[in-house]
Image: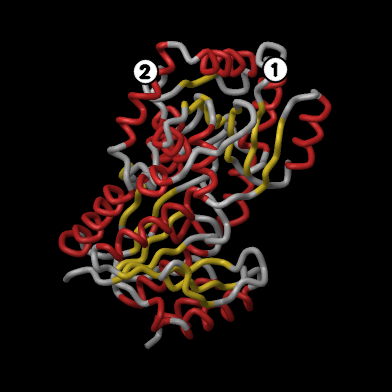
Amino acid sequence: MAIKKVLFVCSIYKPNVGGVEIAIEQASKYLRNRNVDATILTKEFPYGLRSHEVVDNTHVVRIKRPIFDSDFILRTSEIIDYEQVLKADVVHVIGVRRPMPLFALLLAKRWGVPCVITFAGNDLPQMDNLESQNIWAEGLNIVEGSIRQADYWTTFANHTAEVATSVFPNISPKVIRGGVDLGTIHKSKAYQNESPYFFAARRLESSKGIDVLIRAFADISVQLPSYELIIAGDGTERENLEYLAKSLSAKVRFVGTIDQSSVFSYMKGAVAHVCPSRSESGGLVNYEAQAAGCIAIGSNVGGIPEYIKDGQTGLLFENENKEDLSQKLLLVASNNEQIQTIRRDSLEESKKCGWDTFTDTYLDIYQKIIDDIPLKTQFNSWSELTDKLSKQLLSR
């Protein structure tokens, strides 16, 4: 059977900006180039977004986040109302935050099609990341059973695959690293700033380590008095980070949430992009920086070392070590022969990382599952709620 349509299921989607949203946006675009339609099922966040609209030629259906059992039943009815828009040959979940994997699994069983799950972000519990542990605990009664009954599993990095296997010893996720929008990056014009600058495009949350970057930058301000640090993104830590920068008299500018094209422009004009995360499952932004001709600097945690080859396509620093990060910033600012070589090599390496390759890999996986892997057609309820929802969706 030839694949004609893929349903992507995710926790949040555009206008939100992040690795998952970008992966789905780009995969949808390249699927259309291969005559395969894509639709998206996600949550309504922020509130007030339309329940159904077409975004970049792709149908997006949004549901309000269910809290109580009665909410789940209502959301299921709403999803059925949009079945004509959503129905696909493959259901692909990217990111396993509650409650979307359950709806995805039930739809796959209803339609008799494969359910593919991609682990992303901080959705799985990690020992060094309290946020991920809290997210996992909150959705455990919904997410765990959904993951176990999927037909295939993938991740964006070996690190995430190891975490997934530690939680689910009986699965072996395939690692497929994310891609970059090479066309948009190459067309973007470098941001023209009055002074040289370092750049970071990150969610402003504790796990992203922006406070470490601000402290490291402040420490070298005397040596690089003309330099500025520009930070794009928003989050719960923004006010604290702005206060920190002010208290250290650091020349830091917060530009808030910006679109992807603007991110690429800032990268092209920057001396370096810094990804100082305390915890990171992958690190797609590092590929983007390399493709923009910008030196990628990242902490040596999670999947970041898989996206930055230290000394070859970027530089790694010891997690939480602001002194080490300061030295890396100074090294990049020197623009010595080593840095010039890294910039050239990373640009060349990035040519292999387009979203077309990513999408073709998944198309091959979808087809292989359909052709060669027996599907788990039976839905096994694990709670009173899942029993109710299975009867609501699977009774024909």
Within the image, what quadrant is residue 220 found in? top right
The image shows a total of numbered marks equal to 2
**Quick check: can you spot residue 358?**
yes
Q: Which residue is mark 1?
A: 225
Q: Tags 2 and 1 in contact by the CB under 8 Å rule?
A: no
Helix or strand or loop: what does disc 1 sit on?
A: loop
Counting from the top left corner in percent of width and height, residue 352 is at 28, 38
Q: Would residue 268 be found to the left or right of residue 351 on screen?
A: right
Q: Would residue 363 be found to the left or right of residue 129 on screen?
A: left
**In this rendering, which labeled residue sits more in front, label 2 or label 1?**
1
**Amino acid type at mark 1:** Pro
Q: Dot 2 surroundings within 10 Å: few (below 14), some, or many (20 or more)?
A: some
Counting from the top left corner in percent of width and height, residue 83 is at 42, 82
Position of residue 346 relative to residue 327, above or below, is below
The residue nearer to you, when weighing 371 against 337, is: 337
**Mark 2 vs mark 1: which is more N-terminal?**
1
The residue nearer to you, when weighing 178 against 380, is: 178
Residue drawn where x is 30% and y is 37% of the image: 351
Position of residue 240 relative to residue 298, above or below, is below
Counting from the top left corner in percent of width and height, residue 53 is at 51, 76
**Amino acid type at mark 2:** Thr
Within the image, what quadrant is residue 75 found in? bottom right
Residue drawn where x is 53% and y is 44% of the image: 263
The residue nearer to you, when weighing 237 against 340, is: 340
Distance from Cα at disc 2 to Cα at disc 1? 26 Å
Q: Which residue is mark 2?
A: 341
Helix or strand or loop: what does disc 2 sit on?
A: helix
Residue drawn where x is 40% and y is 46% of the image: 187
Position of residue 208 relative to residue 22, above or below, is above
